[in-house]
Image: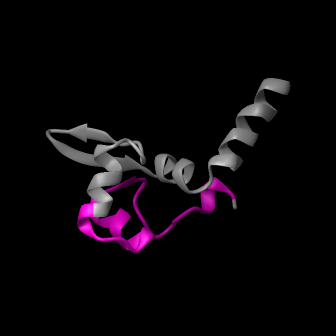
Amino acid sequence: MRQEDFLKEYNDVLLPEDIQKILHVGRNTAYGYLADGIIKSIKIAGKYRIPKMYLYQFLYPNEVDNMRDSKKEE
């Protein structure tokens, strides 16, 4: 899957509620992932914001590693 096509229907910066819908998890699970750093996030004014890239990294860790490795080879 290309990153450009990833979750086109969502904004580039996701909310915890978006994470709940996308992953089909409850509020506590979504916030737990964010608080524990399982899904990387940014806190702005005490509220979680999640760039799509961070969710992509969570869902496809091997693909992100492969992209890094191919850039090192260039």
Question: Which residue sits at x=66%, y=44%?
Answer: 64
* x and y, in percent, of residue 63 in the image: 70, 49
Is 15 displayed left or right of 11 in the figure?
Answer: left
Colouring mode (rainbow / by chain / secondary structure / one colour): one colour
Question: Which residue sits at x=24%, y=62%?
Answer: 28
* x and y, in percent, of residue 54 in the image: 48, 46
Spot the residue most to the left: 45
Number of marks present in the image shown:
0
Is 71 displayed left or right of 29 in the figure?
Answer: right
Q: Note whether residue 74 is visible.
A: no
On whether residue 45 falls in the magenta region, the answer is no
* x and y, in percent, of residue 21 in the image: 37, 73
Q: Quadrant of the C terminus?
A: top right
Q: Quadrant of the N terminus?
A: bottom right
Question: Which residue sits at x=36%, y=42%?
Answer: 41
On whether residue 13 falls in the magenta region, the answer is yes
Vertical arrangement, residue 51 with respect to residue 23, above or below: above
* x and y, in percent, of residue 68 in the image: 71, 33
Between residue 63 and residue 4, name the one nearer to us: 63
Residue numbers of the magenta segment: 2-28
Between residue 32 and residue 46, name the one nearer to us: 32
Spot the residue most to the right: 73
Question: Which residue sits at x=33%, y=43%?
Answer: 36
